[in-house]
Amino acid sequence: MLPASTVLGDPSAYESTPVRIQAEIAEVCQKKGCWAVVRDEEGHSMRVTMKDHAFGIDRDTHGFECDVEGQLVKKEVDPERIAHFKEEGSKTNPEEGQDEVWELVVSGISTRAAQEG
C-alpha cells in the first residue's frame, strides 16, 4: 500500500504496475458511483473509474478515506467526457487545462469514514 502522494505526485513512475493507494475521496459520481476523484494531503488529485463499470461506490462517501487498487492509464482529455462528468455532479476536474491526464482504473475500492484528529 502506497501513500497517495507517492503515486499522485509522479504517476508515470507507476504506469505499467498495478498500484494500491490510500487517499481521500474528494468527489463521487452522483448517478451510479462509477467514478470518484481522490486526493492526497498535498493537493494532488486524480479521477478513478471502476473497471468495466462493474461496480460503484456509495454516492455519500465524499470526505471518506479509501484504499484503491488498480492500473494507471494515461488518457487524452476529451471535452465530451468532461461534460459527462459534470452532468454526474463533478465539480473537481483534474482534467481541466490538460491535454492528457492520468486516471486510475480500479478493480477494487474500500471506503471508511475519515478519522478525526
Image (cartoon, grey):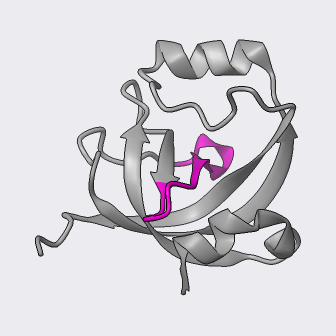
Tell whether 98 sits left or right of 26: right
Please name whichever residue, 33 or 93, is drawn nearer the observer in this view of the structure.
93
Q: Quadrant of the C terminus?
A: bottom left
Please name whichever residue, 33 or 87, is drawn nearer the observer in this view of the structure.
87
Q: How many marks?
A: 0
Magenta stretch containing residue 54, yes or no? yes
Q: Seen from this angle, which residue lies furthest front? A: 42
Tell whether 102 sits left or right of 44: right
Q: Which image quadrant is residue 79 in?
A: top right
Please name whichever residue, 114 or 96, is drawn nearer the observer in this view of the structure.
96
Q: Is residue 47 above or below residue 31?
A: below
Q: Is residue 20 above or below residue 77?
A: below
Q: Quadrant of the N terminus?
A: bottom right
Magenta stretch containing residue 30, yes or no? no
Residue visible at 36% across and 27% down?
A: 30
Residue visible at 45% across and 25% down?
A: 91
Q: Which image quadrant is residue 78 in?
A: top right
Name the spot of residue 19 as percent of width and height, x first.
67, 76
Name the spot of residue 17 as percent of width and height, x first.
81, 77
Name the spot of residue 36 as percent of width and height, x first.
48, 44
Q: Residues in magenta?
A: 39-55
Q: Is residue 57 above or below residue 30?
A: below
Residue visible at 80% across and 74% down?
A: 14
